[in-house]
Every structure is written in structure tokens, then in C-alpha cells.
């Protein structure tokens, strides 16, 4: 069960919003890069986010170039999951590979600052602030296994193989 506060963003949050291109020189210093995560969408996000919190987006989250470090620095900032209406396919795969859950759901019913409780196995978000429950398609077991290991590399290192 994941618990935290919602940080709400709109539609079309690109990988450049997540990790601005002007900070490409920090790719070899990921902890420093994580201190700038999403600053072009919310300049104060990195200083406000706490371990367990959620990034909540609209449609087409993660569009743009394939920056593997984009989901990684979101995770490094303490975010437990990204909740979106829809997601760019490459961002989704990069996120799962890095151990960051991306859940497709109705984010219109989540407001900035709402306290959320997310059950990835049951496919349910309990908005503790509004009392609303939001269902989503549960993550398949093989993807949960990858996420539970902290990402694909950790999974392969530990299990030596990948079984679907």
C-alpha cells in the first residue's frame, strides 16, 4: 500500500519538463539532477515533495525524448508512483524498468494536495481527502515483480532470468 500527497500537473508534461535539457550536464550527478526534477512545471516541486508522495498528471505524460533518467529522478525525489490519464509508451517502459509505478486512472478526481492511499494489487486509489475511490486496471503480476525488486536490472540480477 502506497500513501502520500498528490502533486498535480496538467496535460503534456514532457521529459523536458521533468528533466530540463539545460541541465543535461548533471546526468552524471543524478542526486543533483533530482533536486531539479519537474522544476519547469513547478519550480518548488523538488523542495516540497516528501517520500511516498505522488506525481499526478493528465494526458500524454512523459512525451518527448527517451530520457531514461526522467523517471529515475522522479523516483529519487521520493515519489512512490505517477498517476496519469495517459502516458507516453517510452516513458512508461523506462519508468517500470527503473522501478517507478505508472498507473493509468481518472486523475480529474484528484486535486493538488489530496492525501492518497494506493493499492496496486487491487487497482484502487482511496482519496483520503475527498473520500472518493478511484479504480484502475491493476498492474500485471510480472510487472509488480519488477517494481518490487526496484526495477528490471535489480530483477534480472536477483533472479538471473525473466519469466512472464
Image (cartoon, rainbow, N blue to C red):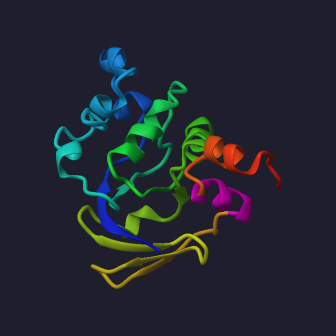
Q: Is residue 132 left or right of residue 102?
A: left
Quadrant (top left, top right, bottom left, bottom right) of the C terminus: bottom right
Closest to the observer, 61 or 122: 122
Q: Quadrant of residue 72?
A: top left
Q: Quadrant of residue 92?
A: top right
Q: Position of residue 71 (x, y in %)?
A: 46, 40
Closest to the observer, 144 or 125: 144
Closest to the observer, 23 or 136: 23
Q: Is residue 28 left or right of residue 32?
A: right
* Predominant SS of the magenta segment: helix
Q: Residue at x 31, y 29 (%)?
A: 33
Q: Residue at x 63, y 68 (%)?
A: 137
* Number of marks in the rendered image: 0
Q: Position of residue 147 (x, y in %)?
A: 59, 55
Q: Which residues are magenta?
A: 140-148
Depicted 142 relative to depicted 29: above or below: below
Q: Position of residue 62 (x, y in %)?
A: 48, 38
Q: Quadrant of residue 23?
A: top left
Report if residue 160 lies within the magenta region. Answer: no
Q: Position of residue 102 (x, y in %)?
A: 53, 54
Closest to the observer, 68 or 59: 68
Q: Residue at x 38, y 56 (%)?
A: 56
Depicted 29 relative to depicted 44: above or below: above
Q: Is residue 140 left or right of residue 151?
A: right
Q: Residue at x 50, y 43 (%)?
A: 60
Residue reaching furthest to the bottom: 131
Report if residue 143 lies within the magenta region. Answer: yes
Amino acid at each position: 500500500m502506497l500513501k502520500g500527497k498528490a502533486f498535480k500537473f496538467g496535460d503534456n508534461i514532457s521529459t523536458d519538463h521533468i528533466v530540463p535539457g539545460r541541465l543535461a550536464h548533471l546526468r552524471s550527478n543524478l542526486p543533483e539532477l533530482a533536486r531539479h526534477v519537474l522544476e519547469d512545471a513547478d519550480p518548488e516541486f523538488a523542495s516540497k515533495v516528501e517520500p511516498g508522495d505522488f506525481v499526478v498528471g493528465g494526458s500524454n505524460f512523459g512525451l518527448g525524448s527517451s530520457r531514461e533518467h526522467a523517471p529515475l529522478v522522479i523516483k529519487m525525489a521520493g515519489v512512490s508512483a505517477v498517476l496519469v490519464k495517459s502516458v507516453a509508451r517510452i516513458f512508461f517502459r523506462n519508468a517500470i524498468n527503473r522501478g517507478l509505478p505508472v498507473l493509468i486512472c481518472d486523475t480529474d478526481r484528484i486535486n493538488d494536495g489530496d492525501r492518497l492511499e494506493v493499492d496496486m494489487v487491487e487497482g484502487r486509489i482511496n482519496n483520503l481527502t475527498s473520500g472518493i475511490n478511484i479504480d484502475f486496471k491493476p498492474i500485471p503480476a510480472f510487472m509488480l515483480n519488477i517494481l518490487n525488486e526496484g526495477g528490471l536490472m535489480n530483477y534480472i540480477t536477483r533472479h538471473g532470468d525473466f519469466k512472464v
